[in-house]
């Protein structure tokens, strides 16, 4: 508010921003009026900008025509006792060159030209005598209403009988309250009042005009009949015409008036990080981040079991499908182009979709808390459009995320040891069986070598070999299982983190940014409205 | 008369009660005018119709009304020959209405039978020689609700004169009061001027006077010398155009007031005679009163029709708004149906475990599934983690719950956005922000509903387990496994539930279906599944109906009030009663 008043160009640009960004959000009747005003502004500025058009408005019988005659100094307008008198607008033009196009635009057909200058300072002037605003002839009022929206300066003529009439004040002067800079209020027929009454009536009129919203409007007492005050009025009109800014001031006031009719959409608050985090978590869960992370862990443990388990039972694990492969995310995927092949992750279930939709809706409502309803609704529409493509986009993002799916270096070591132990155990077993079977085939029995000393004194070496191999196999299997459980948990966490990062990117790009952009338009409109209204 | 009019007065009271309770609470287009019409109709009954219906012979009330600055007060002062009300150049002049009556009629006007809304203040006539500019009290806004009563012997018997405020100035309360006083009058003395006679506002009032058959006299004040010949025919033709050709025109030339601010008595000679002739003739008084009364009742009937239509419009709007909201919930119900078909609810990893659990014919997978099932049972036993059956059950439950709550939330948001689009709806939406989303209890209610549905499923299975063989088979598998299998079949099938579609819907459903078919037989499974689906649909509908019912909290208070039919009926009854009373009289 501290800045200087915006120029007309700034105001028009602001109003244009409002009409463009506000389409579909601002009620159409206001929007149509705003667009019409932009067109009209354009039209007025392209037509003889050096002429100042001054309209004389008032009730029937207030003496508009007589006043125009007095100002012109000639009987150009017909004044009469029968009411209503004037039903066509009449234009009196000084220095008429170039004004005809302007008058065509104003649709004023009755034209009078004057060659003597109206005022030494303001040579190019159009004075329009208008039909009344309050008679039973509705068409008169329509002409006055239309031209009140087009002329550059407004003169409201009242008389002692009618100066407090509601029609003129409520339906004409008050709606043009923003036009104070280009408005004159004339109290005509003061010759009918005594000197004392004259001041009292002027004061009373001043107070009513103030209540209309024009606190600084000047009230000029005039008598068209006696000529009293006519010079002062001519002087005031000359002032208006001489000041170059009259036309711009009028158009500025028009922009201000229409801008005041448009609801301020308000400015959205900055979207909180907490809202975004909640959205990411919900969407991530719905998209299956936890399922994939847990598949990563289970896949690791499965492969670890196959590589490091006791070979006599670990082969059973091969019969089960790898959890990651089942999701289409297994190690074999390498070399495939994830852009082409979507994962074979199950399509989002209806429940997951619902969860996603609830999360997006909650987020949009939180983000749109500060703006008015039509703008919130627009943000919601944007979010709903994003929801249509979100599942497929997320699937692709998950497929592209590099998952920690490689094996560990220690698997090979443990695997070699397991196989050595197994072979050693088998050797021991064969030895034992062979020794036991030799006599059956009539072959001499070899005595089994035994341990000579130590805690196993007297045990047969093949037996020990067999037992040791089984023990090593089982113990090593159990140890590896424990180790891989720890490693798997780590991989699950890493996978989850990477997947959530991918989800965050998608959510930011497809939901947060579009919603924020839609809401930012409200801020832009709000700011433009501030300029247009100031 | 009193006996004859008793039923009419009863009908009138009934109609008044209905009009006072017209219930035009919604901000629809034109409602401001409609509300004003309803309030004006009530005032018209209180101020005029009721007292006049009760006593047709009571004194007449003549209102001197007109535009601001037309000289009403000056004319009243001239009629009485004494300055009673303040006249001046400052507009608007008269604030407090003044009623001047003959001393004998004091009792009638002091009672609140007429204009009961205005407090009575007894005033005094200013001493002779007081100038009109300081007669009476200074205009004061706070006294607008008072009616000042003055006695003066120059007023004819049985006819009181009210100096009304202006009808067209910037003072809103003046205009409202003037309209009320004109509506309460038996006859109008309407003041206009040479400057004003073509103003639109007074003519609107004169048109309404013509509609009510009020007796009108026109005072054309402030006529410039020589202008009368031109103005008079113009005014006369305007009156004729509007059905007031009988109205006498009393013209007064523009003239200087005397030093007391009074017009000479000669200027108002004709209007005074007009008033006296009416006051002096009892039959004429009666005729005027009866004509105005019947005109007022007929006009009231026209207004009641307008108000009844407005009331109907309001009720229709509420019905339409409710239907629009219900349509959103109907769409939500359809969406829930769609989500609970074709396996949409069960696309998920956990379902693969179910497949593992129920098994396939493949030998190795059987071994594996036996192995993993045994392991799962063991881990469940040791760690307390749920078995696949429970997991599947939980997944389906939460999925179903989320779908229902989400759809209810969408429907609520859509219904809310629909409300926001109209002015009337916007007011409702602002008063009930909670309607923008689903009710906070809905998630819990949905969970409870799903539990109940599962309970009903178990009961259904139990009821269908007729013979011992089936019961033994169910027992061996576990009732919950069979229930989950049935749920899966329900959610995997399309609404029609034919064999081919199930096959398309996916392997897991086929498994469930096979399992159930071995127990119950093919036809029974089909029947069970469709019963279960219908049961679920009905339960979701109950939930959504409860959501729609929240709108009632917002809508029902707006329905309170007289029905359009009762308004029309009561007005007709009044017309009939009045016609009957008039018939009895003649």
Image (cartoon, coloured by chain):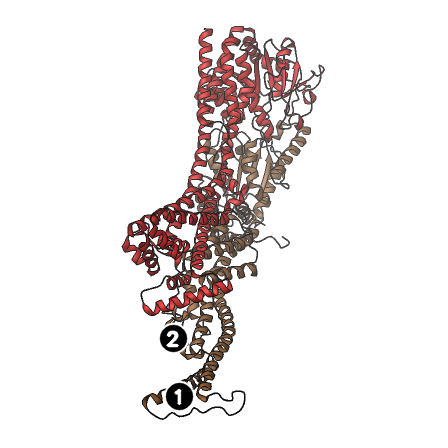
Chain colours: A brown, B red
Q: Is residue B536 left or right of residue B50?
A: left
| Mark carried by residue A431 | 1
Mark with earlier residue (1, 2)? 2
Disc 1 element: helix
Residue B263 visible within the image: no
- For image coordinates 38% across by 48% down, the residue present is B462
Picture coordinates of residue B246 (x, y %)? 47, 15
Which residue is nearer to you in this view: B457 or A202?
A: B457
Q: Is residue A515 left or right of residue B355?
A: right
Residue pointed to by mark 2: A332
Q: Is residue B537 left or right of residue A96?
A: left
Which residue is nearer to you in this view: A437 or B464?
A: A437
Q: Of the residues tagged 1 and 2, which is closer to the observer?
A: 1
Which chain's residue wears label 1?
A
Which chain's residue wears label 2?
A
Split into 4 quadrants, where in the image is the C terminus of chain B?
top left
Tag 1 near tag 2, CB within 8 Å: no
Q: Is residue B343 left or right of residue B229?
A: left
Q: Residues within 10 Å of mark 1 (few under 14, many from 20)?
A: some
Picture coordinates of residue B298 (x, y %)? 46, 19
């Amino acid at each position: 508010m501290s800045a200087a008043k915006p120029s007309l160009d700034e105001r028009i640009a602001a109003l244009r921003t409002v009409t463009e960004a506000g389409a579909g959000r601002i009620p159409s009747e206001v929007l149509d009026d705003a667009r019409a005003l932009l067109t009209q502004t354009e039209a007025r500025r392209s037509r003889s900008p050096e002429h100042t058009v001054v309209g004389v408005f008032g009730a029937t019988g207030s003496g508009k025509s007589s006043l125009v005659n007095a100002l012109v100094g000639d009987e150009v307008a017909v004044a009469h006792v029968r009411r209503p008198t004037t039903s066509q607008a009449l234009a009196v033009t000084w220095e008429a060159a170039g004004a005809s196009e302007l008058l065509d635009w104003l649709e004023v057909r009755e034209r009078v030209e004057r060659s003597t200058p109206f005022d030494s300072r303001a040579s190019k002037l159009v004075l329009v005598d208008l039909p009344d605003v309050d008679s039973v002839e509705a068409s008169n009022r329509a002409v006055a209403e239309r031209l009140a929206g087009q002329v550059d300066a407004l003169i409201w003529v009242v008389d002692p009988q009618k100066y407090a009439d509601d029609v003129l004040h409520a339906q004409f002067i008050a709606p043009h309250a923003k036009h104070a800079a280009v408005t004159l209020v004339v109290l005509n027929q003061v010759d009918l009042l005594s000197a004392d009454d004259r001041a009292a009536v002027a004061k009373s009129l001043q107070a009513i005009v103030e209540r209309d919203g024009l606190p600084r409007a000047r009230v000029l007492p005039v008598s068209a009949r006696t000529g009293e005050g006519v010079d002062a009025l001519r002087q005031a009109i000359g002032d208006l015409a001489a000041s170059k800014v009259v036309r711009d001031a009028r158009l500025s006031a028009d922009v201000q008036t229409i801008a005041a009719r448009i609801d301020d959409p308000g400015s959205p608050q900055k979207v909180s990080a907490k809202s975004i985090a909640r959205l990411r978590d919900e969407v991530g869960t719905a998209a299956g981040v936890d399922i994939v992370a847990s598949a990563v862990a289970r896949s690791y443990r499965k492969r670890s079991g196959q590589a490091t388990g006791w070979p006599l039972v670990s082969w059973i694990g091969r019969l089960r499908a790898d959890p990651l492969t089942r999701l289409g995310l297994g190690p074999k995927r390498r070399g495939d182009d994830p852009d082409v092949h979507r994962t074979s992750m199950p399509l989002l279930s209806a429940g997951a979709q619902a969860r996603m939709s609830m999360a997006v809706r909650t987020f949009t409502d939180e983000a749109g808390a500060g703006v008015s309803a039509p703008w919130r609704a627009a943000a919601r529409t944007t979010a709903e459009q994003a929801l249509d493509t979100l599942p497929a986009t997320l699937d692709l993002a998950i497929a592209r995320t590099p998952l920690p799916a490689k094996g560990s270096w220690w698997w090979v070591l443990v695997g070699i040891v397991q196989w050595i132990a197994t072979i050693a155990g088998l050797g021991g077993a064969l030895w034992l069986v062979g020794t036991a079977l030799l006599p059956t085939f009539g072959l001499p029995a070899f005595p089994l070598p035994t341990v000579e000393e130590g805690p196993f004194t007297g045990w047969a070496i093949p037996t020990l070999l067999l037992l040791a191999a089984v023990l090593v196999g089982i113990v090593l299997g159990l140890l590896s299982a424990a180790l891989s459980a720890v490693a798997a948990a780590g991989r699950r966490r890493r996978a989850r983190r990477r997947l959530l990062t991918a989800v965050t990117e998608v959510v930011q790009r497809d939901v947060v940014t579009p919603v924020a952009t839609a809401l930012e338009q409200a801020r832009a409109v709000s700011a433009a409205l501030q300029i247009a209204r100031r | 008369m009193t006996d004859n009019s008793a039923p009419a007065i009863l009908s009138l009271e009934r109609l008044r009660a209905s009009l006072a309770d017209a219930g035009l609470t919604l901000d629809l287009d034109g409602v401001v005018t409609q509300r004003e019409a309803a309030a004006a109709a009530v005032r018209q009954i209180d101020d005029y119709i009721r007292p006049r219906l009760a006593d047709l012979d009571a004194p007449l009330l003549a209102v001197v009304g007109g535009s601001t600055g037309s000289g009403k007060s000056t004319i009243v002062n001239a009629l009485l020959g004494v300055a009673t009300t303040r006249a001046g150049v400052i507009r608007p002049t008269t604030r407090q209405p003044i009623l001047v009556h003959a001393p004998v009629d004091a009792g009638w006007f002091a009672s609140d039978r007429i204009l009961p809304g205005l407090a009575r203040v007894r005033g005094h006539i200013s001493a002779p020689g007081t100038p009109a500019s300081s007669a009476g009290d200074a205009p004061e806004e706070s006294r607008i609700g008072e009616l000042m009563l003055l006695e003066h012997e120059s007023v004819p018997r049985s006819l009181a004169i009210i100096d009304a405020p202006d009808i067209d100035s910037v003072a809103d309360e003046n205009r409202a009061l003037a309209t009320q006083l004109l509506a309460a009058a038996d006859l109008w003395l309407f003041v206009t001027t040479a400057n004003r006679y073509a103003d639109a506002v007074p003519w609107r009032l004169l048109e309404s006077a013509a509609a009510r058959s009020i007796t009108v006299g026109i005072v054309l004040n402030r006529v410039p010398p020589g202008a009368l010949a031109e103005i008079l025919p113009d005014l006369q033709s305007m009156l004729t155009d509007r059905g007031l050709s009988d109205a006498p025109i009393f013209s007064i030339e523009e003239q200087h007031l005397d030093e007391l601010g009074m017009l000479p008595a000669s200027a108002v000679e004709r209007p005074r005679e007009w008033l006296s002739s009416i006051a002096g003739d009892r039959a004429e008084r009666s005729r005027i009163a009866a004509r105005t009364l019947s005109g007022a009742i007929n006009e009231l009937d026209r207004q009641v029709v307008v108000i009844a239509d407005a009331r109907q419009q309001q009720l229709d709007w509420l019905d339409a708004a409710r239907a629009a909201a219900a349509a959103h919930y109907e769409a939500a119900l359809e969406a829930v149906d769609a989500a609970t078909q074709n396996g949409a609810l069960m696309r998920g990893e956990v379902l693969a475990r179910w497949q593992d659990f129920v098994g396939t014919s493949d030998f190795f997978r059987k071994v594996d599934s036996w192995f993993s099932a045994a392991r799962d049972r063991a881990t469940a036993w040791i760690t307390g983690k749920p078995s696949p059956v429970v997991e599947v059950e939980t997944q389906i439950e939460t999925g179903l719950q989320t779908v229902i709550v989400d759809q209810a939330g969408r429907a609520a948001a859509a219904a809310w956005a629909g409300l926001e689009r109209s002015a009337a709806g916007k007011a409702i939406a602002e008063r009930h922000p909670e309607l923008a989303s689903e009710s906070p209890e809905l998630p819990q209610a949905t969970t409870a509903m799903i539990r109940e549905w599962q309970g009903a499923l178990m009961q259904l299975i139990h009821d269908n387990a007729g013979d011992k063989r089936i019961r033994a088979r169910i027992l061996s598998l576990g009732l919950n496994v069979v229930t989950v299998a049935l749920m899966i079949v329900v959610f995997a099938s399309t609404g029609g539930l034919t064999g081919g579609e199930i096959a398309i819907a996916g392997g897991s459903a086929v498994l469930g279906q096979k399992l159930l078919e071995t127990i119950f037989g093919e036809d029974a499974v089909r029947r069970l599944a469709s019963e279960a689906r219908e049961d679920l649909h009905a339960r979701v509908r109950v939930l959504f109906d409860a959501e729609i019912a929240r709108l009632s909290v917002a809508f029902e208070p707006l329905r309170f009030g007289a029905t359009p039919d009762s308004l029309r009926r009561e007005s007709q009854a009044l017309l009939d009663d009045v016609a009957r009373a008039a018939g009895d009289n003649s």
